[in-house]
Image (tube, rainbow, N blue to C red):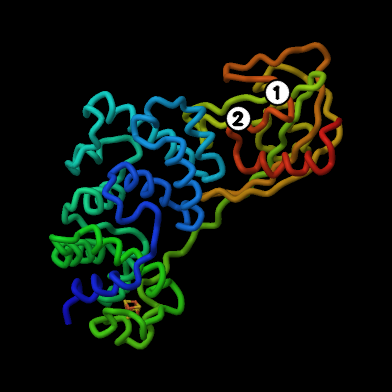
Amino acid sequence: MLFKENILSWYETHKRILPFRDIQNPYYTWLSEIMLQQTQVDTVIPYFEKWIKTFPTLNDVALASQHDVLKQWEGLGYYSRCRNFHKAAHIVMNEHDGIIPSNYDKFLSLPGVGPYTAAAVMSIAFNKPIPTIDGNIRRVTSRILGRKKMRQNAQARIKNYLQIEIDPLRPGDFNQALMDLGSSICTPTKPKCNQCPVNEICIALGSGNPESYPEKMKKKKSPHYNVAAGLIWDRDKFFIQKRSEKSLLGGLWEFPGGKVEKGESLKMALKREIFEECKIKPTIHRKVGVVKHVFSHFSIEMNLFHCSINGEKPKTDLPSQWIKPNEIAQYPFPAANHKLFKILDQDGWNI
Ligand code: SF4
């Protein structure tokens, strides 16, 4: 049985129809691979389509401000992807004459590009026989090869196997076929082995328990934080500040506030945080509400309080603005803030 032939002929009839597929445009391929990191295809599609309408070419991305690209990315999460893509667009325009490098090492040196993204773009957009190895492909291959423990030698074996098997004429299709097989047939639980184009050679299937391959890694329990934030009013406007470039959610706007420390009440924490960040002591009024949000490595509960100031003006090193509720759409905010905006829309914006 021929592995690559079977995978490719299965792909011909079962491949997912995606707006960034089968279009020879390295910009589309690169953008889609960045958006797809840690994110489901169904979530990415509308963002991809909206982005391409706003920025039809990589040059349009380079010419846009960081504020504008983050606004387009708003809600997709992992915002460093967007900031890095924006920086990389500048580098391509200024240092590569506007042409996306088709050399693996040059492309890999761009901000936000790791070995997986470089392999995907090189194979799909430039037809280079470089295998991609993500979680799906690692699972499929470990099952075919019957590798249960994902130690370093197993990883190397998978890489070698794919490097030998990849079709030199259709490397992009080969990689995408494995991606699709992993997401639709060779799923983490209940793989549909009877529909699999490579079931005749699969060692894990032969073992009688394919689902047990590869061995699952124990997940660390992620921490949970209680956060207090202030909606600080001055007449009909409230105060927002822009998160530092280097921080998580960098470049997005938020309310002042921060983590509640051990032994602190929400209001004590809020007073301390606002003083540390803005050098003011506002009056804290009623609670707007609380929302939960899960990030990749931790989760938060964000408690928002109405606050007012008595003539003091916030002093912060970060860019800041006083805005009216109807100006929210002009700024990119994290998802947790949007959940709080919904509560304010329902309950009213008054103190
Ligand atoms: S036979 Fe089953 S376990 Fe093996 S690769 Fe196919 S779907 Fe995965």
250 shown above or below 117: above
Q: Amino acid at mark 2?
A: Tyr
The mark that comes first in sequence, 2 or 1, is 1
Please rate how many residues cluster around mark 2, counting C-alpha atoms within 10 Å: few if below 14, some from 14 to 19, many from 20.
some
Q: Amino acid at mark 1?
A: Ile
* Residue under the point 46% across and 41% down: 51
Q: Which mark is residue 323?
A: 1
* Direction from residue 80 to residue 172 in the image, left or right: left
Q: Which mark is residue 331?
A: 2
Relative image position of residue 335 (x, y in whole percent): 61, 43
* Residue under the point 46% across and 25% down: 65
* Direction from residue 276 to residue 245 in the image, left or right: left
Relative image position of residue 217 (x, y in whole percent): 42, 65
Seen from the viewer's position, the closer of residues 46 and 133 is 46
Relative image position of residue 278 (x, y in whole percent): 67, 19
* Direction from residue 347 to residue 313 in the image, left or right: left
Q: Is mark 2 within 8 Å of ligand 1?
A: no
Q: Are marks 2 and 1 in contact (CB under 8 Å)?
A: yes
Instruction: Give the SS element for disc 1.
Output: strand
* Residue under the point 80% across and 39% down: 288
* Residue under the point 28% across and 27% down: 93
Please rate how many residues cluster around mark 1, counting C-alpha atoms within 10 Å: few if below 14, some from 14 to 19, many from 20.
some
Relative image position of residue 307 (x, y in whole percent): 80, 27
235 shown above or below 183: above
